[in-house]
Image: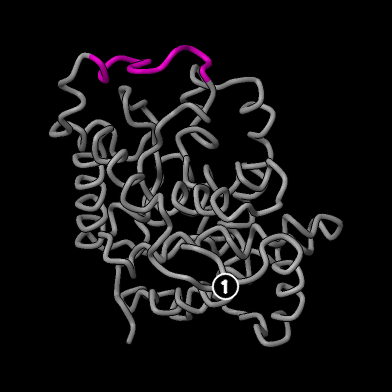
């Protein structure tokens, strides 16, 4: 059974990317009708109203024990095939193909970095949260720090946060909010979604990947940071050193979508080898 979760809103509307240029690269789904943009706006409205410090802490508690499911990486990849968006006019193939397309794009450009190839396969696996019953606004879309005032490049920043209770709380409504200048993103509470969940899952299961890989997974949807140039006042030197890696990954995440689908059966043994190297066996999700 296919679960129609709707389009990832972060792919439909990003003010910092020229949609025509993006479309030319085959990266963005070609949505132009008003009703869809209304739906995307509604998704971000829910996200920006309900993603609070309290909400995010509750989600860390709810999912932090990783007792949802036991499965291998490739079983999780196969699970995501249930998340095909049947309303998508441009992309009607299973989600696993995007995982392999991203991974293969990275492999072609960086043949010497096998860990980076694996990141391409892993990056969206946190979307299994939808199959655990989570609403779309708590799984997909661009991420942002909670506990401080949202910055200008957050999607729909000026029109979707007015009902978020944290912005009425003096602890959370200033530029720094509950943080100290240059405290480091590791000390920042990010909005809850597939990035943060997968990052925490990788730590819990002790993936033996380099720090760059953990940054890519955790922050690949943090567009206000890696593309919008915001939130630098919270960054440590390490964050700024890692930023180019996240930006490099983002190129393959966005620009590898195409109708030429990879031969997944042919690719599977190579990626199984990487999984056996860096994150083998049955994992806790």
Q: Position of residue 95 (x, y in %)?
A: 48, 73
Which image quadrant is residue 83 in?
bottom left
Which image quadrant is residue 268 in?
bottom right
Mark 1 burial class by Cα count in 10 Å: few <14, some 14-19, many 20+? some
- Asked if residue 112 lies left or right of residue 187, the reply is right
Q: Secondary structure at mark 1?
A: loop
Above or below for 169 versus 29: above
Most common SS among magenta residues: loop
- Which of the two residues, 212 or 45, is positioned nearer the viewer here? 212
- Which of the two residues, 38 or 134, is positioned nearer the viewer here? 134
Give the residue at x 24% y 31%: 158
Q: Position of residue 179 (x, y in %)?
A: 40, 17
Above or below for 260 versus 108: below
Colouring = one colour
| Residue 173 highlighted magenta (yes or no) | yes
Total tally of numbered discs in the picture = 1
Residue that label 1 marks: 72
Give the residue at x 53% y 30%: 186
- Which of the two residues, 112 or 74, is positioned nearer the viewer here? 74
Give the residue at x 86% y 56%: 112
Q: Position of residue 197 (x, y in %)?
A: 44, 51
For the N terminus, which image quadrant?
bottom left
| Residue 76 highlighted magenta (yes or no) | no
Q: Position of residue 239 (x, y in %)?
A: 61, 28
User: Given the current orientation, which residue lies at the most extreme right position?
Assistant: 112
**Which residues make up the magenta segment?**
171-183
- Asked if residue 3 lies left or right of residue 243, the reply is left
Above or below for 17 versus 95: above
Give the residue at x 39% y 76%: 84
Which image quadrant is residue 172 in?
top left
């Amino acid at each position: 059974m296919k679960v129609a979760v709707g389009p990832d809103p972060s792919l439909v509307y990003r003010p910092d990317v020229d949609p025509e240029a993006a479309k030319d690269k085959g990266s963005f789904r070609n949505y132009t009708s008003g009703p869809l943009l209304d739906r995307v706006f509604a998704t971000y409205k829910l996200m920006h109203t309900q993603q609070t410090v309290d909400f995010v802490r509750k989600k860390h508690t709810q999912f932090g024990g990783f007792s949802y499911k036991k499965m291998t990486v490739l079983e999780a990849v196969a699970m995501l095939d249930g998340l095909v968006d049947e309303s998508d006019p441009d992309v009607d193939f299973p989600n696993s193909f995007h995982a392999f397309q991203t991974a293969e794009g990275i492999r072609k450009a960086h043949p010497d970095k096998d860990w980076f190839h694996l990141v391409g396969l892993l990056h969206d696996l946190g979307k299994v949260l939808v199959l655990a019953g989570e609403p779309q606004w708590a799984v997909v879309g661009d991420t942002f720090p909670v506990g401080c005032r949202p910055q200008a490049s957050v999607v729909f920043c000026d029109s979707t946060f007015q009902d978020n209770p944290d912005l009425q709380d003096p602890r959370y409504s200033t530029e720094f909010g509950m943080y100290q200048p240059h405290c480091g993103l590791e000390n920042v509470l990010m909005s809850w979604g597939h990035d943060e969940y997968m990052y925490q899952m990788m730590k819990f299961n002790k993936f033996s990947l380099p720090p760059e890989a953990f940054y890519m997974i955790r922050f690949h949807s943090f567009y206000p940071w890696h593309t919008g140039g915001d939130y630098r006042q919270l960054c440590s030197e390490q964050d700024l050193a890692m930023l180019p890696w996240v930006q490099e990954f983002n190129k393959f995440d966005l620009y590898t979508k195409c109708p030429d689908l990879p031969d997944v059966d042919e690719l599977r043994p190579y990626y199984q080898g990487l999984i056996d190297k860096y994150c083998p066996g049955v994992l806790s999700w």
